Image: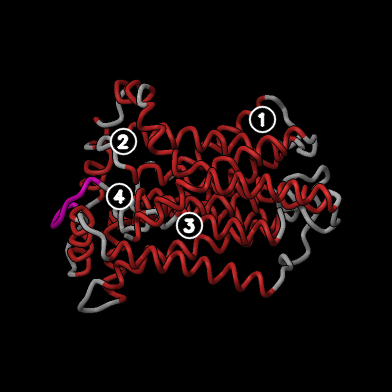
Amino acid sequence: MDAQRLTVTSLTPTAIQGPPRGNTLWDAVAAVLVVGFLAVGTWSTYWAEQRNDQYQLITLGQCVYNGGQLYVDCWENKPPGIAWINALGLVLSPGGQLGVWVLPAAIALLCIIPLWYAGGRMLSPMAARLTAVLASLLATLRLYDAPSINPDFYSAMFELGAGALWLSAVFASFAGRRFLFGILAGLLWSAAECVKQTGCTGLLAITVIAVVLLVVKNVYGRRWLVTALYVWLGFAVGLAVVIVLLTRQGTDRAAWDAIFAFNGGLATWDAWVRSLQSWPRLHAGLEPLQLPLWLALVGIVVTISTGRANRLSQASLAALALWWIVAADLALMGPSQSMRYWQATFPPVILLAAMGLYHLEETFRRLDKGYRTALVLVSLTAVLLLGRPLVEQYNHGLA
């Protein structure tokens, strides 16, 4: 193993001295695919039908763009970030709405960049490329109303970038890098929370695992605690900025009533009990995601079963798994039973799938040539069978 590479499967993490090195040609191919998927997804979203709810969100942005006060001159039971983002889109395209429809893909690309970078540092350049392509593909599935100007999409993308930066912070060997990545992760999580009330699901999951590690006196408990505190610091700074802006406008109380008091009645015990009985919705929500879920399962099983996972990486797997479970339950609790609620499950699945892709690559490298062919055939068969629903939904979204 490269002594300079800190990986999620290392027994003795060491410092990373520089950015990940890769093949320029394959980097270019992956970049073209990422941009291509996002561009095609944006085109199909722009021409999609039944976008009435999205036009309502544009109206919020128009209100802010014209100098109006959110929750006073225009009202919505969502955090202010979605209106501010749409107002930014109107600023980017004066006299039109093109900027509003382009922003989702642009923000998705900005959040995929730290994912790519983190994958290259902790896993391998090839795993990072494939993960970035997978993320761009999931971010353009019209079945889940992606990409779109809905808060669910923005929240999922911000959480994806935050999760990648958090992993970079957890596995950083230098205190300065841990602080920087932690703060940036917290800022992105605050952006996710600023557009959707449940945008901090991942942050809560890693905090729970950090507390568990401290309680059981795990050797990595202090590392997790310090990293979590950095993330929470960034999160607090981001939320403080939002609160200051709302307070200066005199809309802080109106915002609280709209965001929390109004929506409080939706998150009830009965709603949670009903979510546990929503197996048909669970199947419908997960069927197109069979391939990334399989890759995520490979990442979990192989990391643990090979004995190459230390307690630090095991805790990371536990945090990502808990994140996915909570996000899936919230998707089932969604009041309108919309498929776009499943976007919240994309970040942990993608991060876990990155580990699966890495293990498949490493297994291929370690096998003799004769066995490599068998691995390729098995992997291709799995991709063709499990990826079929994904491809079908992607094609359906372009129709």
> Neighbour class for label 4 at 10 Å: few (<14), some, many (≥20)?
many
Q: Which mark is residue 137?
A: 3
Q: Which mark is residue 334?
A: 2
Q: Which mark is residue 214?
A: 1
Q: Amino acid at mark 1?
A: Leu
Going 43% across and 64% down the picture, which residue do you hit? 107
Between marks 3 and 4 in the image, the one whose residue lies nearer the viewer: 3
Are the two marked residues, 3 and 4, in contact with CB atoms closer than 8 angstroms? no
Going 56% across and 37% down the picture, which residue do you hit? 207
Q: Quadrant of residue 292?
A: top right
Q: Quadrant of residue 265?
A: top left
- Which secondary structure is most common in the magenta stretch? loop
| Quadrant in the picture for the C terminus | bottom left
**What is the CA distance from the residue labelled 2 to the residue labelled 4?**
17 Å
Q: Mark 2: which secondary structure?
A: loop
Between marks 4 and 1 in the image, the one whose residue lies nearer the viewer: 4
Between marks 2 and 4 in the image, the one whose residue lies nearer the viewer: 2
Residue 346 location in percent, x, y?
48, 46
Q: Earlier in the sequence, mark 3 or mark 1?
A: 3
Q: Earlier in the sequence, mark 2 or mark 4?
A: 4
